[in-house]
Amino acid sequence: MNAFKSPWFRLGLGTGLLLLALWLFLSVLREAYDVGYAKARDEGRIALETLRGEHQEQELARARTAETSAKAATQRLQEEVARNDKLAADLANQQRIHRQTTDRLSGEIARVNDLYRKALDAEPEPLPACVFTAGFVRVWDEATGARAPMPETADPVRAAAQGTDAIASEQLDSGISQSAVLAHHVRYAEQCSNVAAQLDALIDAVQEKH
């Protein structure tokens, strides 16, 4: 009993209790650390997986948007190609019709230039000669752009002399017949019709794009 009352015994007992308490505290602290670490690790893993999932969703959404845009662009291109093909086909068809008209009218030129009647009940007779002067042909060609305009000289005297000669030469018979004039007009009308059809097709193509 004296040993239990010894100061050394009480000191050893107090130290043991202190160490036990310290060990228990450290154990609790270690357990709390492990629990906190595990929780933080799990939460971090969940957050990372969530972030990866969101990133994948964003990438998938961008891919879907790009695919939709590509399909829309392809659709627009196909529609534009089809529209242009239709315009080209319509234009080619109009040009064929214009050529058919030219061929038909060209075949009628001789019939409408060979004979004429003075009255509905009169007998047909040869068409009188129609003289087209060289000046007439020059004006015609300059108007259509088939010939460049005649230049004007800076010398008044020379211009007057040349003017006199030019007037005389332009009063001569050009040798162009009515049939030739009408044939030229028929072909030129076909060209004008083709140009007008091309312009209409171009206007339609531009308007459909806006």
Image (tube, grey):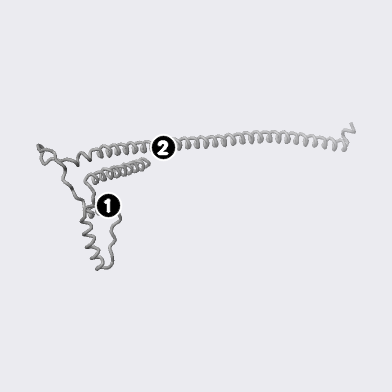
Q: In this figure, which residue is indicated by the disc labeled 1? A: 141
Q: In this figure, which residue is indicated by the disc labeled 2? A: 81
Name the residue at 46% across, 36% down. Answer: 74
Secondary structure at badge 2 equals: helix
Q: CA distance from mark 2 to mark 1?
A: 40 Å
Residue 42 % position (x, y): 65, 33
For disc 2, the neighbor class at 10 Å (few under 14, some 14 to 19, many from 20) is few
Q: Does residue 176 appear to the left or right of 84 in the view shown? A: left
Residue 73 % position (x, y): 45, 38
The answer to which quarter of the image holds residue 116 is top left
Q: Does residue 198 appear to the left or right of 40 in the view shown? A: left
Tell me the quadrant of the picture where the C terminus can be found. Answer: top left
Name the residue at 59% across, 35% down. Answer: 52
Name the residue at 26% across, 45% down. Answer: 184
Indicate the amino acid at tag 1: Asp
The residue at the far right in this view is 2
For disc 1, the neighbor class at 10 Å (few under 14, some 14 to 19, many from 20) is some
Q: Of 17 and 4, which appears nearest the observer?
A: 17
The answer to which quarter of the image holds residue 90 is top left
Question: Which dot, 2 or 1, sits closer to the camera?
Answer: 1
Q: Of 124 and 150, which appears nearest the observer?
A: 124
Picture disc at residue 161: none
Indicate the amino acid at tag 2: Val
Secondary structure at badge 1 equals: helix
Q: Of 16 and 46, which appears nearest the observer?
A: 46
